Amino acid sequence: MASAFNFRRTGLALLTVACTAVLVWFGYGLNPLWPLLWFAPLPVLLLATRPARQVALIAFAGWFLGCLTYVHYFSMLHVPWPVVLSIEALLFTGAVLLYRALLLRGATWIALVSIPALWTSAEYLFSLTTSGGTAGSLAYTQLRFLPILQLASVTGPWGISFAILLFPATLATAWHLRRTAPAQALRICAAGLGALALMLLFGVVRLAEPAVRQPVKVGLITSDIAANDSIVPTGADASRIFRDYAAVAKGLIARGASVIVMPEKLAVVANADPREADAVFQPLADQAGATLVAGVLRIDPPHQYNRALVYTPHAAPLTYDKEHMLPPFESPLTPGTSLTFLPHSPAPWGIAICKDMDFTNPARRYGLAGVGLLLVPAWDFNVDRAWHGHIAILRGVEDGFSIARAAKNGYLTVSDNRGRILGEVRSDSAPMATLLVSVPTAHDSTVYLLLGDWFAWLSLALFALAFARLFYGNS
């Protein structure tokens, strides 16, 4: 009888690991199915009252196996995936053990928020201390779930991650209390699910608000053909690729485009060489009355910059240097420190480059300056076109501006300040892929712009309270 009982317990544990792994694999990968992650922690939390060692093993195994979906991608980026995935699995395991300890002590309300508070706190601290910024946040799994995405306008990404984990914590806590304290289980459900319902209602109302458009037509161009799918060397090759892009830009301008965005690092521009880009793009900007943004690798010994060149009619070219580099590929480059603005009505425009959008800054600094449109040259890795290519969308929701992002090996994407994708095509859809979209350019003020990372600090405070509750206070 004992062996049969142990077999059932072992089978349930293995089934829990498998369910968690599958939900994480498909809900937290490069092409996430957003509803799945809301349920991914639930199987483990339902077993949280088991012995601590068993719970820890189940939690670690389920999350680690699910995160193996990233192995190929991390290997391609030279990221030590066993270390990174182990840290993620340990973080989830620690959150589950904290929840378990508080639940068994009868501290049910603080147990309820302990998991989302711990995880959100860790996301925030990682964003401040690692080269990935916010890229690992659970929030990016919800980019297609527009009502919950609006929460970023108040809390930044941190509130979305909190909400995702609050849902399974609520269900699991109510389950554990269903027999011993049914009235409290109902109160837990009412509070947790009620809070989530209010978040969704806020999102629905925000999405229903009429847009103040002041639109401008934006054209995006990229080319993934072999001759253009790397950083073209300076000289004749650089002049050739600039002319090719300019020829396509002329066609988009003829169709009404007022601004053209091209990818990052089209070619090398060396300080000692003639300014091939200026010779091609400045006359086009002057003649057409349009703005053109092109990315180059600028060599200016002893420095190298990932630079965006910005051409406006009858004015000296502007520049923007990328702030956040992708190691190890961009480790030798010098980061920029300044924002670049283009004066326009009703709101100015700004410039950022690719990985800059993985961080809450410089996007928030642009938002505080009242920018209505951010122009973003970029370069993705094909496999991450949906995941990394769409991270930028959340910055627009947080900071109140539309985004036009042109990436090699990714997408040409235009989104508004609600996170709605207004137009998108794959970069490999044509030898010179293009997109022409009418984009709203009015700035929208948000609570996140006013208060910044207040919710991350609230999560840190809740985590500290939960941790302290392990050692102080009566159950």
Image: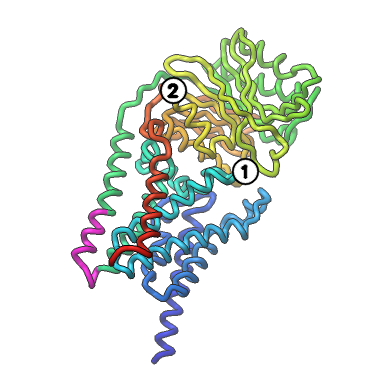
Residue 290 makes an appearance in the image: yes
The amino acid beneath tag 1 is Asn
**Helix or strand or loop: what does disc 2 sit on?**
loop
Q: Position of residue 277 (x, y in %)?
A: 71, 19
Residue tagged 1: 382
> Which image quadrant: the N terminus?
bottom left
Please tell me which residue is depicted at 44% across the width and 71% down the height of the picture. 55
Residue tagged 2: 370
> Which image quadrant: the C terminus?
bottom left
Secondary structure mostly seen in the magenta stretch: helix
Q: Position of residue 421 (x, y in %)?
A: 45, 34
Q: Position of residue 216 (x, y in %)?
A: 47, 19
Q: Nearer the viewer, residue 259 or 298?
A: 298
Magenta segment: does it hold 190? yes
Crowd tier of the residue under label 2, counting other residues whose Cα lies within 10 Å: few below 14, some 14–19, many 20 or above = many
Q: Are marks 1 and 2 in contact (CB under 8 Å)?
A: no
Residue 428 makes an appearance in the image: no
State the extent of the magenta-drawn residues as a range.
178-191
Left or right of residue 171, residue 459 in this image:
right
Left or right of residue 76, residue 174 in this image:
left
Q: Nearer the viewer, residue 268 or 330?
A: 330
